[in-house]
Image: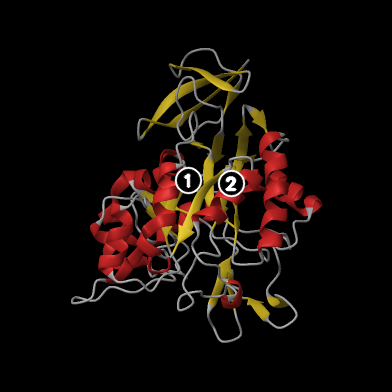
Amino acid sequence: MLRIRSKKVYIDEKFVPAVIEIDNGKIRGIMDYDDEYDKDYGDMKIYPGFVDIHCHGYQLFDFSNADEEKFVKWIKDLPKEGCTGFLPSSSTGSEEKILKAMKLFRKYIENPIKGAHVLGINTEGPFISFDKAGAQNKYEIMMCKSETIEKWQEVSGGNILYNTIAPEMDRDYAMTKWCAENGIVVAIGHTNATYETAMGAVDSGARSFTHTYNGMSQFDSRKPGVVGAAFDSDVYAELIADGVHTHPASARALAKIKGKDKLIIVTDSVSLKGAKPGVYDKNAATKVIVHEDGSIRLPDGRLSGSSNAMNKLLRNAVINMHIDEVTAVNAMSKNPCELLNIKGKGLIKEGYDADITILDDDYNVIMTYCLGEEML
C-alpha cells in the first residue's frame, strides 16, 4: 500500500488537492488531502501517465532491426519522460522485417517487464500513398489487401491496435472496413486523397488522422483536402506538438476544432531519438540530420520523424502553443486510450491502473509510476 499526495492532482479535468491510494498496481481510492499519506509531492502536478500511440524508435532501435536489447532499453527509458504506455510503430518496409518486429513486440506485450507498458502495435506503413510517403521508402509500399493485415494480426497475436491507410489506395475501403469490423482502429494518413475520399473512409470506419497536416493533402477553400476532412469530421486527430512539424497557430486551431476529447498528441519519434546533433546514416543510400532543435531531416530538408519526449511536448503545447492544459493533458492520456479501447488507463480514477506522472512547474519529470511502481 502506498499513499501519495499533492495539492495539484489531475482529477475530472481539474487540479485538486488529494491523496491517491495505490495497492497492487491499482488506484484503490482517491481521498481527502488531509488524510494519511506516505509521500508528499507538495505543489507538483500529478497527471495520469502519458500514452504515446505513435512512436517508431529510440537510440538506434526501430522495427527494421528488431534489436531486442535496444527495445528493452526503450521500454525502460520511456518513464523518464513521463510515458507509461506506448505502441511501437512500423514504417514502410519489407514484410519480412515488419513481421520480425511484430514477433518481438508481441513477446513484451504478453510478458511485460518493468518500464512503460507495450500496449499494442501501430502499423504506420506500408499501406500509404506513393505521393505522400514522406521519408518512408516509396518502393516498399504495399497494396491494401485485407488478407495481408489479417495475416499480420495473426502473427502479432491480435495485438495490432492501430493501422494507417491512405484511402485512395484502399479500393472500396475494403481494408478500412475489415479493420473496423475486427478491432483495429484505422487512421487516415500519408495520403493525397481528396476531401470526399477521406470522408468516405470516415464513413467506412476510419476513426483518426495520422500526424495531422503532415503527409496529407492540404486545406484550400475550394479543395479542403484531407486536412479539411480532419477539421470537418467528428473523429480523432493526431498532432506532433513540437512547433516544428506544425506551426503553433495551426496546432492551436486543430486543438480548438477537436476539443478536449478528440485531440491526440504523439511524438512520432524515430530511431535517432536520443542522438546528439549531427549527420547519421539512415541506410546505405540515405543520410539524415539531427538538428539542434531536435528535428530530424533528410538532406533536402524534408522532416524524417522526431526526437520528441512526451513531457517536452506537453510543455510546448501549453506554454508555447497556448493550447489549454486540459486539452493537452487529455490528448496525452485519456484520449489515446479511448480511441484504442484500452481499458483501465488514462485517468486518475479509482479502479484504474496506477500509471502516474509527476512534473514540476517547468514540466520536468520528478517521478513516474507504472502500475504503482516507482520507475526513476
Task: Count all numbered tags in the image, as a single digit.
Answer: 2
Q: Which of these two is toward me, 39 or 165?
A: 165
| Sequence-first tag of 1 and 2 | 2
* Residue 180 percent across, percent down from the top left: 41, 46
**Going 68% across and 35% down the picture, which residue do you hit?**
110
Question: Position of 68 compared to 15: left or right?
Answer: right
Q: Which quadrant would the C terminus be assigned to in this image? A: top right
Q: Residues within 10 Å of mark 1 (few under 14, many from 20)?
A: many
Q: Which disc is residue 153 wearing? A: 2
Q: Which disc is residue 301 wearing? A: none
For badge 1, the amino acid type reads: Ile
For badge 2, the amino acid type reads: Gln
**Going 31% across and 50% down the picture, which residue do you hit?**
235
The residue mark sitting in front, 1 or 2, is 2
Cβ atoms at labels 1 and 2 below 8 Å apart = yes
Question: Position of 159 compared to 167: left or right?
Answer: right
Q: Residues within 10 Å of mark 2 (few under 14, many from 20)?
A: some
- Judged from the image, the secondary structure of the residue bearing numbered disc 1 is loop
* Residue 215 percent across, percent down from the top left: 44, 71
- Judged from the image, the secondary structure of the residue bearing numbered disc 2 is helix
Q: Which of these two is toward me, 110 or 51?
A: 110
* Residue extending furthest toward the top: 36
* Residue extending furthest toward the left: 222
Q: What residue is disc 1 on?
A: 184
Which corner quadrant of the image does residue 18 belong to?
A: top left
Relative height, residue 39 to residue 128 (above, below): above
**Going 45% across and 37% down the picture, which residue do you hit?**
341
* Residue 155 percent across, percent down from the top left: 66, 46
Relative height, residue 197 to residue 52 (above, below): below
Q: Which quadrant would the N terminus be assigned to in this image? A: top right
